[in-house]
């Protein structure tokens, strides 16, 4: 009698495996039936996701602590970077909690709570990326008047809106928009419904399109600024080319990384449902978690002020080459 145990993460659809409840029913009643103890094993994909969540939590916790404990990092840009780091930190915690609940505390309530936390956190992460893009565009378009009290107010409004929307999205499964009672409506992420996943996917595509348009405009502004600076210093041929190439490559890395991480899972969520093998969900979801690992590198650790704070915390000093480095138009 061969039995193949199947263990999946509680919020991913389980592959259907036929299992017979009784065998050899015609056997003699004098023969005792000994049922084998269930073998406890862990899905390797869940281990990878939990490991990814641990790395995400540790990395983004460093950014959150630096911004929170450094009074000089209170500009709108740092508030948005802190929002992104906090969202990614919660997403990492959600992946860890989901792993623990999936194997130690299995219930419908834990499924709803963990999937709600993960969805809300990743929604806030993507929303923070869009807010950072808007902030960068406005800081370049209104370069002379952007640093004002009105800017701080606008930043707080953006943060309230994006976190309010993320929390509402995360509460939808808890409030009843789930497929626990009707499995036919499940998406690739159980207990999210197919309609819920479709709304999230379409929203992501719209935000990505808006980010792409804003970064194109940012690239144009950077090129124009670099051209003006080069004309003033009379070395157009070299400086303008180098600065423009650096700015374009930076923007390409930002958008390319974002699309490469999230696009596979987004498109898969639109076309697939709960009947698809769970391995496809794992394979497309894992790169999406990598975006939360890369975000601190792109948005936080590349920032000169955060680098200074890190050096002060780790070494108690700031390297001279870092303190004297000037910000160029390509640092967007």
Image: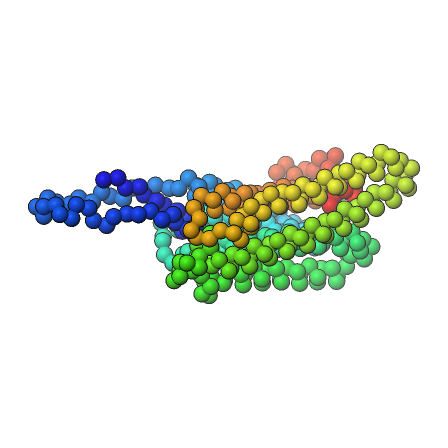
Q: In percent of the image, x 36 and y 52: which residue is there? A: 105
**Colour mapping:** rainbow
Q: Position of residue 154 (x, y in %)?
A: 70, 61
Q: Is residue 99 left or right of residue 152?
A: left
Position of the N terminus, as image quadrant, is top left
The quadrant in which residue 229 appears is top right
Q: Position of residue 172 (x, y in %)?
A: 49, 63
Q: In percent of the image, x 51 and y 56: which residue is there? A: 197
Q: In percent of the image, x 62 and y 46: which residue is there? A: 258
Residue 243 showing in the rendered view: yes
Q: In percent of the image, x 74 and y 41: which residue is there? A: 248
Viewer-closest of 210 and 294: 210
In the rendered image, the residue lying farthest to the left is 30
Residue 75 showing in the rendered view: no
Position of the C terminus, as image quadrant, is top right
In the rendered image, the residue lying farthest to the bottom is 175
Q: Is residue 306 left or right of residue 197?
A: right
Q: Is residue 233 left or right of residue 48?
A: right
Viewer-closest of 309 and 292: 292
Q: How many marks?
A: 0
Q: Position of residue 241 (x, y in %)?
A: 82, 36
Viewer-closest of 138 and 323: 138
Position above or below: 296 against 148 = above
Q: Position of residue 90 (x, y in %)?
A: 53, 52
């Amino acid at each position: 009698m061969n039995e193949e145990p199947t263990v999946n993460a509680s919020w991913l659809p389980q592959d259907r495996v036929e299992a017979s409840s009784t065998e050899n029913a015609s056997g003699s009643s004098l023969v005792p039936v000994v049922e084998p103890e269930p073998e406890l094993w862990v899905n390797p994909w869940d281990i990878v996701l939990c490991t990814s969540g641990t790395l995400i939590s540790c990395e983004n916790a460093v950014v959150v602590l630096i911004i929170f404990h450094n009074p000089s990092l209170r500009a709108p840009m740092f508030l948005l970077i802190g929002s992104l780091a906090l969202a990614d930190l919660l997403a990492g915690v959600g992946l860890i909690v989901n792993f623990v609940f999936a194997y130690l505390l299995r219930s419908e309530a834990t499924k709803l709570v963990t999937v709600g936390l993960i969805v809300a956190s990743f929604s806030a992460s993507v929303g923070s990326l869009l807010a950072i893009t808007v902030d960068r565009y406005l800081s370049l378009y209104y370069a002379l008047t952007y640093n004002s009290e009105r800017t701080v107010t606008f930043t707080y409004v953006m943060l309230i809106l994006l976190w309010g929307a993320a929390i509402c999205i995360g509460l939808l499964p808890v409030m009843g928009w789930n497929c626990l009672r009707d499995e036919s409506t499940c998406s690739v992420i159980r207990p999210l419904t197919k309609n819920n996943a479709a709304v999230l996917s379409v929203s992501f595509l719209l935000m990505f399109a808006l980010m792409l348009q804003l970064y194109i405009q940012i690239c144009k502004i950077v090129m124009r600024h670099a051209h003006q600076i080069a004309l003033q210093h009379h070395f157009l041929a070299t400086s303008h080319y180098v600065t423009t190439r650096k700015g374009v490559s930076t923007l390409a890395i930002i958008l390319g990384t974002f699309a490469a991480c999230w696009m596979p899972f987004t498109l898969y969520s639109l076309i697939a449902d709960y009947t698809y093998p769970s391995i496809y969900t794992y394979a497309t979801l894992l790169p999406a978690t990598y975006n939360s690992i890369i975000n601190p590198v792109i948005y936080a650790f590349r920032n000169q002020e955060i680098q200074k704070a890190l050096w002060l915390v780790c070494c108690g000093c700031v390297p001279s080459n870092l303190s004297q480095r000037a910000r160029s138009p390509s640092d967007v």
